[in-house]
Image (cartoon, rainbow, N blue to C red):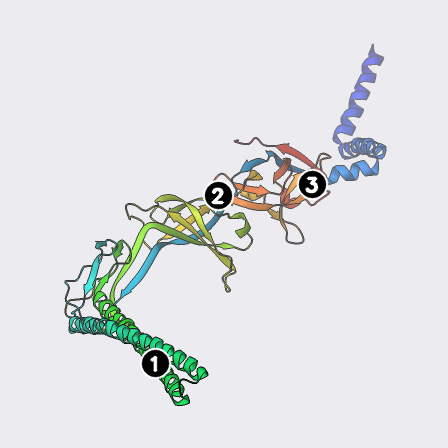
Amino acid sequence: MRIISLFIAVVVTAFMYFFIIERDKLLAFASSDAADADLTAEAEATPETTLEAAQVVRVVAQHSAARIIDSAVIVRGETEAERQIDVMAETSGLVISTPLRKGAQVSEGQMLCKIDPGTRGASLAEAKARLAEARAGVPSSAARLDEAIARLDEAKINDNAASKLSEGGFASDTRVASTQASVRAAEAAVASATAGLESAQAAIQSAEAGVAAAQKEIDRLTVVAPFAGLLETDTAEIGSLLSANSPSGAHCATIIELDPIKLVGFVPETEVTRVEMGALAGARLASGKEVRGQVTFISRSADPQTRTFRVEIEVPNKDLTIRDGQTTEIIIAAEGKSAHLLPQSVLTLNDEGVLGVRVVTPDNRAEFNPVTVLRDTIEGIWLAGLPEQADVIVIGQEYVVSGVPVEASYQETNE
């Protein structure tokens, strides 16, 4: 028993010696055994497996499915009156009518300015008298023509009889020559009478033109509204002089038509082919009011400076609340497109500067896919150019390039 106790005491003493006195050597020995085990495990693994495991990048991706959206064309523009015109006087004179104030509603044909007639009434009466005189001269001219024709017929009969008698020796040559001279004189009289009748008829036409001119001059004394609308300016003040010889001095009033009203925008040349005549369109004014209408005009010629095309939308404006020149955002309906709704942060650029997103391929590698931004909304951006189903990298896309192995974890969407 004493031998066993002594043996145990020696072993415990030796353990305590190495654990306390030679502790560093003991730990070094133990760590060398672990390192040898790790080296053995690494030696068993292939170099390719070790390298690829070291290059795998962890990313977060999102399952995305394409949907058909209304790919509208969005442009900024302004409202424009359907018609606006400066009403000008066509004759000169003093205004004798009470002015209408701006903002007043006028109907088509309503009097805006009345000009003092002066001596225009006397000129019309004179023209009518000349017309009556000219018409009175026509019957006498016609009678002279009839008389000349009758004498011509008589002269021809006498000439024919003298010729027959001369052939039988019963009339002298002198008589024949005399009858022929009578025929020539009668023909000249007919020509003269015809000219007189034509002159009388020309005098009638001239007199009628004079009457029409005098009447037109009187009609121009009243300046009327060419269409129904609103007065944008006061009409000419009573007593003011309107001068037809000066465009600035002949201004009577400015009329504007606001129902319907036009929305005018300028579409880029890359989008103009998507806009069609009759397409539905909506707009939001700067005041917040929303309106709807249809496309009524698409320009065939681009603006030489902006290379954009003018587009007009006609909108009802019965209550005249939409004014000319208001800023508006116009949305024109176009053919739908297949697109993905994704966060704006997924967008990135490749080495060539092309805009796109990075997706996870079926073999778990990153791949760059060019895209086109169709619309930017509060929920995200609509992108075209991706396949119907795509796993888009939403976190970590800036740390991978095409072909790099990735380990993706997928986040849920709110769709």
Q: Is residue 236 left or right of residue 368?
A: left
Q: Nearer the viewer, residue 212 or 281?
A: 212
Q: Across the whole image, how many numbered discs are drawn on residues?
A: 3
- Disc on the earlier residue, 2 or 1: 1
Residue 252 visible in the snapshot: yes
Picture residue at 61% right of the left edge, 47% below the top: 348
- Disc on the earlier residue, 3 or 2: 2
- Which is in the foreground here, disc 3 or disc 2? 2
The quarter of the picture where residue 234 lies is: bottom left
The quarter of the picture where residue 197 lies is: bottom left
Gap between marks 3 and 2 measured at Cα: 36 Å
Q: Is residue 101 left or right of residue 168?
A: left
Residue designated by label 3: 366
x, y percent for residue 219: 22, 65
Picture residue at 51% right of the left edge, 64% below the top: 304
- Disc on the earlier residue, 1 or 3: 1
Q: Is residue 379 left or right of residue 351?
A: left
x, y percent for residue 3: 85, 13
Gap between marks 2 and 1 measured at Cα: 85 Å
- Which is in the foreground here, disc 1 or disc 3? 1
Query: Relative to 184, does residue 257 appear above or below in the rendering?
Result: above
Residues under numbered marks 1 and 3 in contact, where contact means CB atoms less than 8 Å apart: no
Q: Secondary structure at mark 2?
A: loop
- Image quadrant occupied by the N terminus: top right
Residue designated by label 2: 333
Near mark 1 (Cα within 10 A), the count class, few <14, some 14-19 or many ≥20, is many
Query: Relative to 177, does residue 341 appear above or below in the rendering?
Result: above
Q: Nearer the viewer, residue 15 or 44?
A: 44
Query: Relative to 57, does residue 152 appear above or below in the rendering?
Result: below
